[in-house]
Image (cartoon, rainbow, N blue to C red):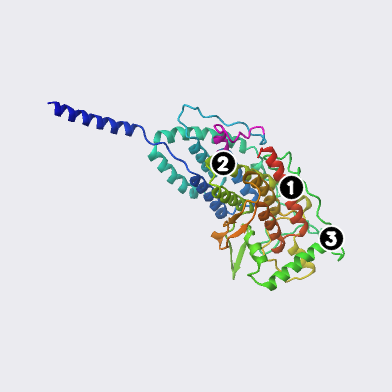
């Protein structure tokens, strides 16, 4: 009888243990790789949807800021951006006793805010549904309470996001080309597209006092006089291109130009057919460099999101600042002047993007991003940049973020799409903006 009671007791204990273990599911674990996956998927979709570089910068900024703010409320390292970012007010706070998983909420926010900013939502849903299924299977209660909280934050951020004038700029008039002024920008081959985002300086900045806060010095005055500064810079573009072409496709200059091309509007003509090639934007390239840096340093989840958020803010403001100058100076591209006045058969090594020349967008963005990343990860941060490998372009190595930004800027001369002033002044403009951003963000 005693043996039977002991057996029953053991069975009861086992049943209790099983029930107890079933009633307390494992907490959901969120990894940096999952956040990287979300970022990478958004980049892939932006390439597919052919987002312009300025618009792409907006798509990076809001999701990363939202994720950052969710984590900052319980962080000893990173503080809220309230009072630093224009128009932003603090998100709803999670109840400490509610069981909300802040890392999960941050990932949900990145996915959902990104989804609201892209066109091909169904492509992001593939990743989202896969992740959510696993999370639900791990701990349904934690998933649901976290999702409820994340949705409150998402609604809060969307309300702020919707006031940045983006929607208003969608209905503003196209850019008018002044064909009577030889110095003014004109659409370029092969598509002769309208100038993109002529009203981007009306987008609400994140940190800047205004779009013109870091207005650069004016470009050299347009002139075809051979002793003028403009003509000197024009001939530099032409002569450098001629020299590079003689060296062949394997030259270092062409490799640099192609590596930093980052023009999502490139099209290729084959007979009667024209198709676009897949390329990331300048902002996307620097977001991927951010990813490379976080992986090299084995950054934890908080620090990874911090790097993405702060870099994306600088990139977004850099585009606002740059585009403000582009449509103010409205300077003609080298391709147009060279074809009209020097060599009608000349082609730049890179395809000219569809907007005015001064200043160089890649120079401004690279300058700003390099400063912020240097403040986060330090000087002389050597890294191998494999961002362009998916597009058939080999890895390039750099000794620092500043080295990378200098090469990115110079690539515009090698590519034949910018004059020297746009490159040098653009890089200087970007670095000044980057230091301002770093100081305001307390990096």
State which tag comes first along the sequence, 3 or 2. 3
Earlier-in-chain disc, 1 versus 2 = 2
Q: CA distance from mark 3 to mark 2?
A: 46 Å
Q: Which mark is residue 132?
A: none
Kindly identify which residue carries mark 3.
229
Observer able to see residue 354 = no
Q: CA distance from mark 1 to mark 2?
A: 32 Å
Residue 52 within the magenta-colored segment of the rendering: no
Q: Tell me which numbered mark, 1 or 3, is placed earlier along the sequence.
A: 3
Coordinates of residue 307 in the picture (x, y in percent): 59, 44
Q: Residue at x 54, y 32 (%)?
A: 74
Per the picture, the main secondary structure of the magenta-coloured stretch is: loop
Dot 3: what SS? helix
* Label total for image: 3
Task: Judge from the rendering whether residue 391 lies leftward or rightward of residue 238; answer left or right.
Answer: left
Query: What is the quadrant of residue 439 in the picture?
Result: top right
For label 1, the SS is helix
In the displayed orientation, state which residue is furthest to the bottom: 246
Residue 114 percent across, percent down from the top left:
55, 44
Residues under numbered marks 3 and 2 in contact, where contact means CB atoms less than 8 Å apart: no
The residue tagged with tag 2: helix, strand or loop? helix
Q: Is residue 164 visible?
A: yes
Residue 324's disc number: 1
Q: Which residues are magenta?
A: 67-83
Q: Residue at x 76, y 55 (%)?
A: 424
Residue, disc 2: 303
């Amino acid at each position: 009888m005693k043996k039977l009671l002991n057996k029953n007791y053991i069975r009861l204990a086992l049943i209790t243990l099983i029930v107890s273990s079933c009633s307390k599911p494992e907490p959901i674990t969120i990894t940096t790789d999952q956040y990287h996956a979300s970022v990478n998927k958004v980049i892939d979709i932006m390439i597919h949807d052919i987002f312009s570089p300025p618009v792409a910068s907006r798509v990076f900024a809001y999701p990363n800021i939202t994720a950052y703010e969710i984590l900052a409320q319980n962080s000893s390292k990173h503080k809220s951006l309230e009072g630093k970012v224009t128009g932003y007010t603090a998100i709803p706070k999670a109840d400490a006793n509610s069981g909300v998983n802040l890392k999960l909420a941050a990932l949900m926010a990145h996915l959902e805010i990104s989804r609201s900013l892209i066109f091909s939502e169904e492509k992001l849903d593939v990743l989202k549904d896969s992740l959510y299924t696993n999370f639900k299977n791990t701990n349904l209660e934690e998933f649901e309470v976290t999702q409820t909280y994340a949705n409150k934050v998402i609604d809060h951020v969307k309300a702020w996001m919707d006031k940045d004038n983006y929607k208003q700029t969608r209905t503003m008039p196209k850019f008018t080309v002044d064909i009577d002024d030889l110095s003014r920008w004109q659409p370029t081959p092969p598509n002769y597209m309208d100038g993109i985002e002529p009203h981007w300086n009306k987008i609400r900045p994140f940190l800047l006092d205004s779009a013109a806060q870091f207005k650069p010095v004016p470009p050299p005055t347009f002139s075809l006089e051979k002793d003028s500064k403009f003509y000197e810079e024009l001939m530099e573009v032409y002569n450098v291109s001629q020299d590079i072409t003689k060296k062949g496709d394997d030259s270092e200059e062409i490799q640099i130009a192609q590596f930093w091309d980052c023009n999502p509007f490139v099209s290729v003509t084959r007979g009667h057919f024209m198709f676009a090639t897949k390329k990331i934007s300048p902002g996307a390239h620097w977001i991927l460099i951010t990813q490379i840096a976080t992986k090299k340093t084995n950054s934890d989840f908080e620090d990874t999101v911090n790097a993405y958020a702060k870099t994306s803010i600088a990139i977004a403001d850099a585009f606002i600042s740059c585009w403000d100058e582009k449509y103010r100076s409205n300077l003609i591209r080298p391709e147009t002047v060279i074809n009209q006045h020097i060599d009608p058969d000349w082609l730049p090594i890179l395809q000219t993007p569809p907007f005015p020349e001064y200043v160089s967008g890649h120079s401004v963005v690279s300058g700003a991003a390099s400063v912020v990343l240097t403040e986060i990860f330090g000087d002389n941060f050597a890294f191998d940049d494999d961002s362009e490998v998916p597009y058939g372009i080999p890895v390039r190595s750099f000794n620092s973020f500043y080295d990378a930004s200098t090469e990115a800027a110079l690539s515009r001369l090698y590519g034949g799409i910018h004059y020297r002033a746009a490159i040098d002044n653009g890089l200087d403009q970007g670095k000044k903006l980057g230091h301002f951003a770093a100081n305001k963000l307390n990096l």
